[in-house]
Amino acid sequence: MKFKRVVALIALTSFLLPAPYSASAKTPKPTLKEIREAKKKEALRKDAAEIAQAKLAAARKTLKELNSIAAAAQSRYLKARAELAIASNKAKAAASHYREATAAVRSTHNQIGRLASNAYIMGSGFTNLDALLKADGPQDLMDRMALLDSLGKGNKTALSRYKFAEVVAEEAKKEADATRVAQEVATEKVEGAKKEAEAAEAEQQKEVDKLQKVQDRLAKELASARKVRVTLEQQRQLAILEEENARRASQTSGQSKVWTDDGFSGRSTTRASEAQRLKAVQFAKKQVLAKKPYVWGDEGPNAFDCSGLVYAAYRSAGLGWPNWDRLNSSLYWGYTKRVRLTELVPGDLLFYSYKGTVNTIHHISIYAGDGMVWEARSTAKGLQYSSMYSMPGLMPYGGRV
């Protein structure tokens, strides 16, 4: 049988996804070959999921490394930006110094111009010889010599300041401009590295996201394959159980363990729909397959007695107070409509009595179809799937809720 057919079968019959249980339908019995194929498919899904998980782990490791690289690039970029700011400030300071030096040069030029102007005004140069020849006496000569000395010193000082200021200003400007240009180049280079690192990180994140989607899909496929395998195994076990109980029922001598019809009465109407009866059957089936224990007086969800299972099953199907209440087995007899054993449908109730009388009814079960019932049998046997004839004292009528 192909895998798709098996999946379709599971969807229709699995107790994990309950389907209506009819009197003519039997639990399908998957073959050992189908179970082996399901196990093989599950193993393949598991291997694929493990490979994908390894790839995802490697990609996450690479992403972590790229995160570190991008962070380092960001740090270098910020450092380069800070250094560029320092270089820019240095260039501004040099420019300011250059402006001050230029102003000093202009001032020196002005002083030299004034010296030349004075010499011209005083006529035919202003040398030491002129001062001696044109002096009007000793005092005038001394005055002229002092002035010449003062102007000479001023001229030398102005020229010296001019040359020094010009050299310092140009050197400072060259150094600051060179530093700024170099830092701008370095900053641009670091910024490029930063962008490259961030781009690599973004691409790796895309790869991680893609691998995560693959991993999620494979995990779902693995879970689905495991569910198919488990369900096939459970269906086979249930089918084997049904076959065994049917064999036991076929060996029971007809109605020999059923009390005679003494004209018992019950309700004239029913309260549950067919859908509700089928839901009650599925609820009881689920509790039996879950191997819940038998505890007298309990009505679930962890344990049940016989009437507690019946009450909980129909309550789960939507029946509640005042139409449905927790009663003992014999009271449920009068609380349901009489149905001949040959007319039973899944969801009908079966009753067992010590003496064939209503007041000696001691056990109740839910008809599953094909002569089988779901029941909470006893403390020793727990909840089980049995032949309707497996317990002696079957009453001649069933009860329809």
Image (cartoon, helix red, strand yellow):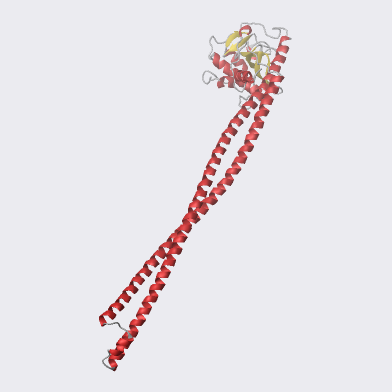
Q: In this view, does 49 lie to the left or right of 89?
A: right
Q: x, y percentage for residue 376?
A: 66, 20
- Which image quadrant: the C terminus? top right
Counting from the top left corner in percent of width and height, residue 382 is at 69, 23
Taking depth in this image into account, of 268 and 278 the one nearest to the observer is 278
Toward the viewer: 291 or 353?
A: 291
The residue located at (30%, 90%) in the rendering is 141
The quadrant in which residue 397 appears is top right
From the viewer's perspective, is 93 left or right of 141?
A: right
Residue sitting at x 67%, y 21% = 232
Position of residue 57 relative to residue 329, above or below, is below
Question: What is the quadrant of the N terminus in the image?
Answer: top right
- Measured as percent of width and height from the top left, residue 336 is found at 57, 13
Q: In the image, what residue occupies the spot 42% across and 66% down? A: 170
Labels in figure, total? 0
The x and y percentages for residue 389 are 69, 12
Name above or below for residue 42 compared with residue 386.
below
Indicate the quadrant where residue 209 lies. Answer: top right
Left or right of 84: which side holds 31? Answer: right
Residue 367's quadrant in the figure? top right
Compare residues 95 and 57 and report the one nearer the observer: 95
Could you tell me which residue is drawn at 33 percent across and 76 percent down?
112
The relative height of residue 54 versus residue 95 in the rendered view (above or below) is above
Residue nearest the viewer, comparing 5 with 173: 173
Asked whether residue 361 is in view, the answer is: no
Instruction: Give the answer, above or below, for where 182 lies relative to 69.
Output: below
